[in-house]
Amino acid sequence: MSSRTASEGDLAVGEVRTGFLSHSRALSLEAALILLELVPGEQVRSASRPRAYAVSPEPLTGIDCVLPSLNGRRTRAVGTVASRVTLTGGRILQACSYAEIVRAGSGNRQAWSHYLSHPGVVETLGKLNAEDAAAGFAESERGSRGIEVGIIAEQQMNGVQNSPMLDGVLPVRARRGSWRWAFQRPEKGGGELFRFKILGDGTRLLRLALPDHGLDDVIDLVEDLALHDWLLSTVEEILERAQLGSGPPAKMLPLVRPVIDHVLHHWMPAARVKPELMPLWATLDRAQGFTRQWDLSVHRVRDQLALNTVTMLSAASDGYRADADEPALRRA
């Protein structure tokens, strides 16, 4: 999606949630435009290629809280968190809530009208240490998140999932993916920073410092990484439940089939990532082995299908021979 003009904050933080849409079949693009009308009067953006994709307008949530911190700083921050909900392929739902953090022009708290006029911006009432806040939010388990954008993302996602347009039936039982990220604009002459970590509860932490890139481009990148990481995790979860190789192929097929019906065709890395940011996708792919693990999982599914086909053909052939031999046995 195209980038809007973002404020030049020192830091932006956000969280992404990813999961299946609570609906028994894929939603058409036309229906998705209605589902994602989260702000009356504002347009839902969409595209049909290379796959169906729709992104909601951005509702705002007011916050008055403490900034994230690695070292226990307690800096007050007031403003609004912006959220957007996307639907990919009519099937995969993502909610991203985020805020740019800027130094306030005044040390005094303003009226809410002031903060509402700066959507998605949180102002600090005190000194902002962007390095400490970024590390506290998206690099260390010891850090304090401060701004609970993850809760806001969950609320936005749940609101869409509870829409009367949906029948509430999940196509596959799968856990939601959770990514927490921080994006800094380095000082003049500063280099890139790209750090990734997985916490014990499965939450992914991503910390970025990128010169000359807009916030919307970074959100597109993070959402795409979160989407494909979740696809891979979902396939691995399904294959683990199926316990391939532990029973008759015919018994395994119903357990593996959801991968074919609902997951495999969504794998399309970096389809909406700005070309200049694709090397970052490739860097994480090499380090974490996303594509290698994906290819291995797909091959396991295809091998299971091939084995099931051979087993069925063999059983049918044995049955045919038995039927053909029966008249001869009667004559004897």
Image (spheres, rainbow, N blue to C red):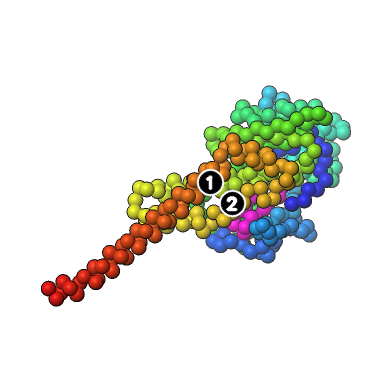
Q: Position of residue 250 (x, y in %)?
A: 37, 57
Find disc 1 in the rendering and name its residue. Answer: 294
Q: Dividing the picture into quarters, in which one does residue 55 lie? A: bottom right
Q: Is residue 36 visible?
A: no
Marker disc for residue 267 = 2
Determine whether 259 is above or below 64 in the image.
below
The residue shown at (65%, 58%) is: 51
Q: Nearer the viewer, residue 184 or 151?
A: 184
Residue 237 belongs to magenta span: no
Q: Dividing the picture into quarters, in which one does residue 72 lie? A: top right
Residue 81 left/right relative to 282: right
Marker disc for residue 172 = none
Determine whether 229 is above or below 186 in the image.
below
Magenta stretch in the rendered image: 79-94
Determine whether 237 is above or below 33 in the image.
above
What kind of residue is marked 1? Trp
Count residues near mark 1 (Cα–Cα under 10 Å), then give few for <14, some for 14-19, many for 20+. many
Instruction: Tell me, yes or no, whether the two marked residues, 2 and 1, touch with CB atoms within 8 Å.
Output: yes
Q: Residue furthest top?
A: 71
The residue shown at (24%, 72%) is: 324
Q: Is residue 44 visible?
A: yes
Q: Position of residue 238 (x, y in %)?
A: 47, 49
Residue 212 left/right relative to 313: right
What kind of residue is marked 2? Trp
Q: Position of residue 247 (x, y in %)?
A: 34, 51
Q: Main secondary structure of the magenta part?
A: strand
Kindly state the secondary structure of the residue where label 2 is placed: loop
Q: Residue furthest right?
A: 105
Residue 54 left/right relative to 186: left
The residue shown at (56%, 39%) is: 289
- Mark-to-mark CA distance, 2 and 1: 9 Å
The quadrant in which the C terminus is found is bottom left
